[in-house]
Each structure stands twice: as structure tokens, then as C-alpha cells.
Amino acid sequence: MHDLKTILVLAITSAALSAPPALAQEAGGEETKRTRIALGPQIAPSYPGADDVSFRPLVDLSRARGAEEFAFEAPDEGFGFALLGGDKFSAGPSLGFEGKRSSSDVGGALPDVGISVELGAFMQYQMTDNIRLRAEGRQGVSGHDGFVANLGADYVWREGDRQLFSIGPRVTVTDSNYQDAYFGVRPEDVAASGIAAYDADGGLQAVGATVGYIRQITQRWGIYSYAKYNRLLGDPADSPLVETFGSRDQVSGGIALTYTFGTGVR
């Protein structure tokens, strides 16, 4: 989960907590939803291909009606909500974010890559009670100005809302604009940087896996955690920027405390 998603979740959470009782209740006076908020720290690569990590806030918000279970969401999926679909298939908008890469991160002679806001859509399909497939495609409208697609599958085991464990593979595919922004070296930058020119074509960027675990300790309090590993492949893995300043191994993870309020929560 990235910083922009964190800001959006915090805004929604604030609205939920400050909503007047008339908005949170039916005419009969009983609440119709439960809300679970997670807040804690996480680490993530400072930018794609980095060999160091940055600390960021880990924030998540889930809602459920009455006594139904909280819907499964993978910890590394983009911010979005379903507009189409039913029990098995759903689709909707997706929002992603990538942090800034400063020139100083790659020797001080290459251009910055600004903060990237990515807009797009997702599709997901619940194959069985335990297996979910999901695809996200987003176009950068700032920063790298490229296209990124994230493909994943998750095996999900749960004991109601008491415990939820998920694990699954990930594949990341990006276009030439994205890959050149983070892994390429322009001919005009060779003299100042001392690094050979490198043209990173679009295609496979990384493969990896994500693991998530949520444990409810009491009706109100619980623990939310995840770990993710990606391995750079193809042109990104062979980039002189990765060889000199970065790493092919990309690791993320975080842990948060959860708090649940609403119907039947004591």
C-alpha cells in the first residue's frame, strides 16, 4: 500500500468516525455496518530497483454489513472499488502511486523521476471459495508516465473474521516509458554520469509472491500483517543502474494494529 492510498484511506476513515448517528443507523436505530481500521508501519523499496527501503504508514480500511465476513483484499492491491460484477466477477477503477526517485539515488547525474499517480482499472474472478485471480492495469499521469500491469492469484484460508491467511504469486509487466524512467540511461546523460547508455524495453519487470495474515484477538482489536518479495527480470534486472546502485531483490512488509466497530462489536 502506497502513500496516496494511505491518504485516501485516512480521509475515508475520518469521515466514517465523524459521521453523525443518523448516517450510521437505519430508522430503527440499529447500525447496519461494521468497520475495521488498520494502522501501523511498513517498509517498501524507496523506488523501483532500489537497494534500500523506506518506512511508510500502513493503513487499511474494510467494511462489512451486519454479521457478514470482511471481504478479502490482498495487501498489495491498488486502491479501488467494484462498479460491475456479482458473486464471482467484479471490476472497477484502480488507483496506484509510486514514490519519487531523486537524482542523488543514482549517482547525482541522472534526471529525477517525480511522484507518479497511476489511474486505471481492475478485474478479479473468484474461481473457488479459496482461490481468487486479479489483474490491474494503470497508466501513469505524472512521474514515470508509463503503463503498469499487476497480475496475481491468491489462495485464501480463513476462519470467519477470526483469522485470514493468503498467499500467491505476482507478475509485473510495464511498458518502455516506465522501464526507461527507472532503469534506462539516456545517451545525453552518459558523459555526466559515467554510466553506459541503456534502453530498457517494455515487457516483464518482475515476478514474486505476497503473503498476508490477519488475526482478530478480541472483537475489537486484532493484528494485520503482510510480506512481499519481487525479483527483477528482463531489462530491469540487466540495467546498469540496478547493478551499480540498486538490487534485483525487492522486499516489502508491514504490521498494523486493527480496531473494529459497528454492529455486534463490544
Image (cartoon, rainbow, N blue to C red):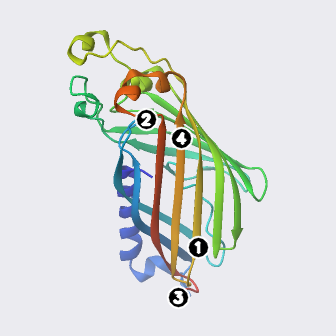
Query: To which residue does mark 2 refer?
Result: 247
Give the residue drawn at x 33%, y 33%: 142
Query: To which residue does mark 3 refer?
Result: 29
Circle on res. 230: 4
**Residue 196 picture location, percent across and down:** 34, 13
Q: CA distance from mark 2 to mark 1?
A: 33 Å
Query: To which residue does mark 1 refer?
Result: 215
**Mark before the other along the chain sequence, 2 or 4:** 4
For this orientation, the residue located farthest to the right is 128
Q: CA distance from mark 4 to mark 1?
A: 25 Å
**Mark before the other along the chain sequence, 2 or 1:** 1
Residue type pointed to by label 3 = Gly
Discs 3/2, front: 2
Q: Answer yes or no: do the residues labelled 4 and 1 have beta carbons within 8 Å?
A: no
The residue closer to the viewer here, 108 or 156, is 108
Residue type pointed to by label 4 = Asn
Q: CA distance from mark 4 to mark 3?
A: 48 Å
Residue 145 visible (yes or no): no
Give the residue drawn at x 59%, y 55%: 211
Would you say 243 lies left or right of 84 here?
A: left
**Residue 249 picture location, percent across and down:** 49, 39
**Callout 4: 10 Å neighbours few (<14), some, many (20+)?**
many
